[in-house]
Image (tube, rainbow, N blue to C red):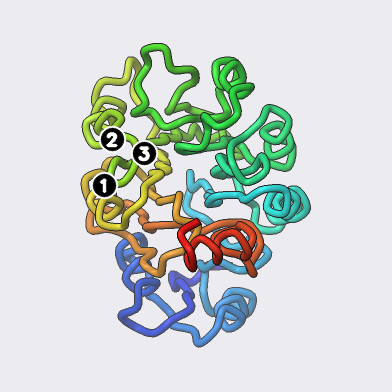
Amino acid sequence: MTVPRIIAYQGEPGANSHIACREVYPDWEPLPCASFEDAFAAISDGKAGLGNPANGNAPRPAGACRVLMIGDIIGKPGREVVERLLPDLRAERRIDFVTANGENVAGGMGLTGSTAEALLAAGVDVITSGNHIWDKREMYAYLDSSDRVLRPYNYGTHDVPGRGVVVHEALDGTEVCVMNLQGRTYMAQIDNPFTDADRILDESAEPLPPVRLVDFHCEITSEKNAFGLYLDGRVSAVVGTHTHVPTADDRILPKGTAYQSDLGMTGPIWSVIGFGLGPKVCSCLSHV
């Protein structure tokens, strides 16, 4: 059976999904669909040869690696959701590699060895983090001993535990480089993430694999935008974390890098960025 060179997507002509189809598969004809269900049906019915169906059975180009990147996981509720849903989701969507930001897993602030192990056991391949990775001192030794939990690279190397970049093998055998860096606007004045990213990409002792994922833990969207465009064409994806609110700017940048300013959080919906309403609302009312 000949697979039609048609790629189904949900959205209107000219939308980001349409642009991504044109850029990533220039030789394929995009097929706009009113809903995800219509896109799935187009593949099932043989009208399209590519897409993103719920069962993950769409043909993929040779060497393609399917990646899931999860934003900030907040406390016990977020961790339990990941533990409950991720194993089946990986199987259903045939996901080869998973990253997750775990800096807020332990009681909403920080990470512990036991909570890190729980996420890894649930199917997370590499845990990224940010400024709260230092909140639990017991993690310092763990960061030195584990190559699957990262802290922001640009905290430097002098008397700082852990690492900020790792190459790990995905389920399909693809080598994936994960980079974790942190912004500086309204945050700690650590090393420059832009020049440190250059150092990782240009001065690595061994050539990095083509698949390169970046978690940029950063406060403001303008710094995230600048960082994504700075790395465009040099990495596979730049995604932001830290604000716990997903942004609606997911897109493929001009040179082919996937980008989103913030992935949002995995945590309680009826909360203030994952935390209880009472203390947060009171602080807004009285500054106490």
In this rendering, is residue 260 above or below 269? above
Residue that mark 2 sits on: 193
- Mark 3 or 1, nearer chain start: 3
Q: Amino acid at mark 3?
A: Gln
Report the front residue among 113 and 263.
113
- Mark 1 or 2, nearer chain start: 2
Q: Amino acid at mark 2?
A: Pro
Q: Mark 3 falls on what kind of element?
A: strand
Q: CA distance from mark 1 to mark 2?
A: 8 Å
Residue 22 visible, this angle: yes
Q: Position of residue 145 (x, y in %)?
A: 60, 15
Q: Amino acid at mark 1?
A: Phe
| Nearest to viewer (mark 3 / mark 1) | 3
Residue at 39 percent of width and 76 percent of height:
30
Kindly give the residue lying farthest to the right in the view shown. 84
State yes or no: discs 3 and 2 in contact (Cβ < 8 Å).
yes
Residue that mark 1 sits on: 227
Residue 131 in the figure: left or right of residue 39: left
Question: Total marks drawn?
Answer: 3
- Mark 3 crowd level (few <14, some 14–19, many ≥20, 10 Å Cα): many
